[in-house]
């Protein structure tokens, strides 16, 4: 089933407006910090049998993983307006999984999609409407709207005294208050 999802997302990516030029695909991209603004979803498949569904989002970029807050009664068009920060080295995309929170049964996947980072890493910003696909049938189950901002590491920008990506700089601060990912301190 995961293979079907990957194939559906890959096929959609090939046909979407987010095609990357050959130049972008071949160039080495600098490490830096990606700020992802999770804005809203539209047209989600309704997975709740009674009442309106309570969707939330899980974002994963490499080993970093965040969970948005649940939009209680968000239904098919939830709004989050939440910001997440990722340290990006080699990662090329963020996997977006929209879930339906269920107090009685297990939470259920509404749809999965991928936000490609190449445009944000080259231009500094990008706005994407990411298609979400059903994990079993590969059918589209809505979209998620994102804004991406990428800032290269200071060391890559030639700032004197800057600490290269991955070097220890004292302590780590959480990048978000809720569900934030904290790397282990050395």
Image: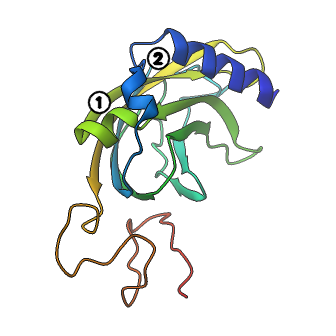
Q: Position of residue 87 (x, y in %)?
A: 43, 61
Circles 2 and 1, Cβ within 8 Å, touching? The answer is: no
Graded by Cα atoms within 10 Å as few (under 14), some (14 to 19) or many (20 or more), the crowding at tag 1 reads some
Q: Which residue is mark 1?
A: 127
From this view, report whether residue 93 is shown above or below residue 132. Answer: below
Residue at image coords 56%, 39%: 95
Q: Position of residue 144 (x, y in %)?
A: 43, 28
Q: Position of residue 103 (x, y in %)?
A: 68, 48
Residue at image coords 39%, 68%: 177
Q: Looking at the rendered structure, which numbered label has been put on residue 43?
A: 2
Residue 180 visible within the image:
yes
From this view, report whether residue 104 is shown above or below residue 169. Answer: above
Quadrant in the rendering for residue 111: top right
Relative to 174, 186 lies left or right: right
Q: Looking at the rendered structure, which numbered label has been put on residue 96?
A: none
Q: Dot 2 lies on which element?
A: loop
Q: Position of residue 186 (x, y in %)?
A: 55, 88
């Amino acid at each position: 089933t995961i293979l079907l999802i990957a194939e559906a997302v890959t096929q959609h990516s090939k046909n979407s407006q987010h095609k990357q030029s050959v130049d972008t695909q071949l160039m080495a991209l600098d490490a830096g910090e990606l700020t992802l603004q999770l804005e809203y979803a539209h047209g989600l498949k309704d997975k709740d049998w009674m009442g309106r569904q309570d969707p939330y989002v899980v974002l994963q970029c490499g080993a970093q993983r965040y969970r948005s807050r649940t939009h209680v009664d968000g239904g098919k068009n939830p709004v989050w307006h939440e910001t997440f920060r990722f340290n990006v080295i080699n990662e090329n995309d963020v996997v977006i999984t929209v879930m339906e929170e269920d107090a009685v049964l297990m939470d259920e996947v509404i749809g999965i999609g991928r936000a490609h980072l190449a445009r944000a890493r080259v231009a500094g910003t990008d706005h994407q409407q990411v298609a979400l696909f059903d994990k079993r049938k590969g059918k589209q189950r809505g979209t998620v709207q994102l804004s991406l901002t990428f800032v290269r590491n200071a060391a890559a920008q030639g700032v004197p005294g800057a600490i290269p990506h991955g070097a220890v700089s004292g302590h780590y601060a959480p990048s978000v208050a809720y569900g934030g990912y904290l790397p282990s301190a050395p």
